Amino acid sequence: MEKLSIVKIGGNIIEDETSLNAFLKLFANLEGKKILVHGGGKRATHIASKLGIESKMINGRRITDAETLEVITMVYGGLVNKNVVAKLQALHIDAIGLTGADINSIQSEKRPIKEVDFGFVGDVKKVAHNSIDKLIKADFTPVFCAITHDGNGQLLNTNADTIASTIAVGMSEIYESSIYYCFELNGVLRDFNDKNSVVKLINSKTYQELLEDKIITDGMLPKLENCFDALKNGVHKVNMGNTTMLTNENDNFTTITL
């Protein structure tokens, strides 16, 4: 089976021009077929405040009312996505910027209202892996922003980590797909105050031990649950760390397998 890398970058990398340029060089040099997924929450918050629109968060998740959805569509699908695509073209990568509505690639349903009404937030239902593969087979590199659609004309704000994992699951029907979650830390850390205390390999057994020792808590929990879901649904492996894990020189990052 041919290999496919799905790389997701966090908002802090997008916000910093130097970090973004350095990352995109590494991404451009990554061998084989690849897909890039990005968010842009920090930029969206910044531009919303300039427009006098207050950003509301609950448990680190954005409440997306109609006004906020307009800003997110402009920022994720326009400003951030097209900037990234243009920079990749300069690095000789024939990138194509997409939302989940383009080529009907990612369909979601609006999150049901339970304790919280998140507004226009989507939970992914379906990834059109054959359509995405047509782009890859034509030597295009898809660049997805964190927007999906419901099939009835409604765009939905969707978590970028989830988009990366569901694309990887969908594409695993055709490829040996691996996910790279790039963020500021070197990986999953044993001790948050020691940036080099990276847990290099996590499997189902070590994951339980890390949970019992309370090493994995808070924001890392949903990330890792997401990773194991992806692995159980056909993804080959998941890697977490800073952007240098895309090179062969760095082996100080976390790999997650079953």
Image: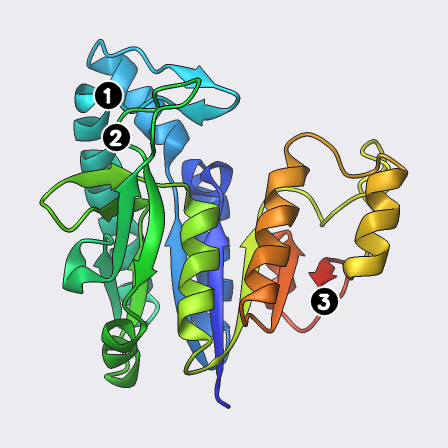
- How far apart are labels 1 and 3 at the CA level? 38 Å
Which residue is tagged 3? 258
The reply to whether discs 1 and 2 touch (Cβ–Cβ < 8 Å) is yes
- Circle 2: residue type: Phe
The structure residue drawn at horizontal position 24% and vertical position 62%, both measured from the top left corner, is 105
Specify the color scheme. rainbow
Residue lying furthest bottom: 1
Describe residue 85's horizontal placement relative to residue 101 as left or right: right
Q: Could you say where residue 243 lies in the image, as x and y percent from the top left?
A: 58, 55
Disc with the residue nearer the chain's start (2 vs 3): 2
Describe residue 110's horizontal placement relative to residue 34 as left or right: left
- How far apart are labels 1 and 2 at the CA level? 6 Å
- Circle 1: residue type: Asp
Could you say which disc has been placed on residue 138 in the image?
none
| Whether residue 74 can be seen here | yes
Describe residue 131's horizontal placement relative to residue 167 as left or right: left
Q: Classify 249 as above or below 102.
A: below
Q: Quadrant of residue 96?
A: bottom left
Describe residue 118's horizontal placement relative to residue 186 as left or right: left
Q: Could you say where residue 80 lies in the image, as x and y percent from the top left?
A: 29, 43
Q: Classify 183 as above or below 202.
A: above
Q: Could you say where residue 117 lies in the image, as x and y percent from the top left?
A: 34, 20
Could you say which disc has been placed on residue 65 in the image?
1
The structure residue drawn at horizontal position 53% and vertical position 21%, both measured from the top left corner, is 59
The structure residue drawn at horizontal position 20% and vertical position 37%, both measured from the top left corner, is 73
Q: Could you say where residue 81 lies in the image, as x and y percent from the top left?
A: 27, 49
Which residue is tagged 2? 120
Callout 2: 10 Å neighbours few (<14), some, many (20+)?
many
| Whether residue 201 can be seen here | no
- Circle 3: residue type: Leu
The structure residue drawn at horizontal position 83% and vertical position 38%, both measured from the top left corner, is 215
Question: In the image shown, does 76 or 22 lie closer to the viewer?
Answer: 76
